[in-house]
Amino acid sequence: MPEFDREKKIIFSGIQPTGVFTLGNYLGAVRNWGTLQDEYNCIYSIVDLHAITVRQEPSKLRQNSLQAYALLLACGIDPKKSIAFFQSHNKCHAELNWVLACSTQFGELSRMTQFKDKSKKHADDVNAGLFTYPVLMAADILAYNADLVPIGADQKQHLELARNVAGRFNNKYGEFFKLPEPYIPPVGASVKSLADPTKKMSKSDENQNATVYILDDKDTIIRKFKRAVTDSETEICYREGKDGINNLMSIYSCVTGKTYDEIESEFASKGYGDFKLAVGEAVADYLKPVRDDFSRLIADKAYLKECYTSGAESAMRITNRILSKVYHKVGFVDAR
Ligand code: TYM
């Protein structure tokens, strides 16, 4: 069980168990989660409550959730250093969600771009959970009074809402919640679709060539990169309007550590074909240890269970205390 250090700041982040993580999830968020473990007290959650805001097949959700947990560990989250658990195993998230919902305005939720996108995409099921999704996300973070939230750029608006909700609660009931800061990486914060580089890379893209999944094998990864949509020019450089090349350059920079200048000189006399192949190979090699660790971890269900059970216990120890204080602040009679 992780020993938390009072001197260190608290990090919370989450990921939905709606399928294999994409290269976007990895570069934008999850790989950073691993690197932050020594410097911060980290809490990472597979957010299954969020996942049911869109229709899920129950047996598939259960399978995807276990897979997501194993992936989290394969991506370098060490359950001895960080708390890693399923959101549904800690009831405080749902309880705090209710209290915070009463400090969230209908108007601000209506402005969320993810709600607008998802309600278009799932027009036959625009449920209340989809609408109040960001409140639950605020509850996830505030239940631990987290300082920092490592996320990709697409979650920034939700984090701003969490800060507003926390501020409003503090105004009503007296200073209590910290206002969490986003931690958005300088490169990789918005990995784009390989089929349409103006859109973000997403798990649910119908075009299989658009998304690289972190468990794809080497040949598949290379094939997807070879088909990546670019432009009709020939120069490999980072410039406005070259969305496809810019995306490939940022991915290559993330996995090799090279700067854009270094990449430009490396490919100065080469064509797009060579560059796409190099990016594909570099990504496949970079992800190989994750694939290998995943196969080992997913086979050991007993170990996974031990980790997520103790993760949930540690999580509850923190949130029970915070939730009791919140209940007291809003005026509920103390239970004990
Ligand atoms: P989710 O599951 O969609 O994505 C998990 C993380 O991956 C990042 N991400 C990307 N980063 C760069 N490029 C991309 N193409 C890309 N696609 C996804 C996301 O920004 C995210 O950081 N609502 C959240 C989950 C959540 C959460 C939380 C996050 C629930 N509660 C509390 C932080 C704190 C979501 O759906 O992420």
Image (cartoon, grey):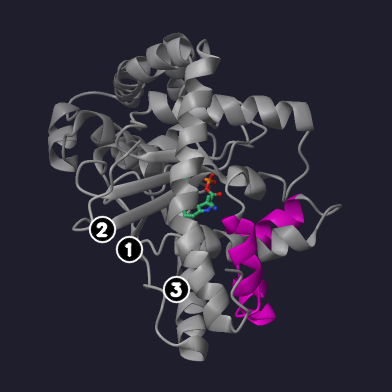
Q: Can residue 162 be seen in the rendering of this structure? A: yes
- The residue that disc 1 covers is 147
Q: Quadrant of residue 116?
A: bottom right
For this view, does 19 lie left or right of residue 35? right
> Mark 1 is on which residue type?
Asp
Which stretch did the figure color magenta? 92-121
Residue 51 location, x and y as percent? Answer: 66, 44
Q: What element carries label 1?
A: loop
Q: What element carries label 2?
A: loop
Residue in the image at 57% along x and 46% along y: 87
Crowding at mark 2 (Cα within 10 Å: few <14, some 14-19, many 20+)? some
For this view, does 260 lie left or right of residue 149? left
Residue contact between numbered discs 2 and 1, judged by CB atoms under 8 Å: yes
For this view, does 255 lie left or right of residue 307? left
What label does residue 9 carry, if any? Answer: 2
Residue contact between numbered discs 1 and 3, judged by CB atoms under 8 Å: no
- Looking at the image, residue 286 lies above or below residue 114: above
- Between 264 and 185, which is closer to the camera in this rendering? 185
- Between 144 and 111, which is closer to the camera in this rendering? 144
> Mark 3 is on which residue type?
Arg
- The residue that disc 3 covers is 163
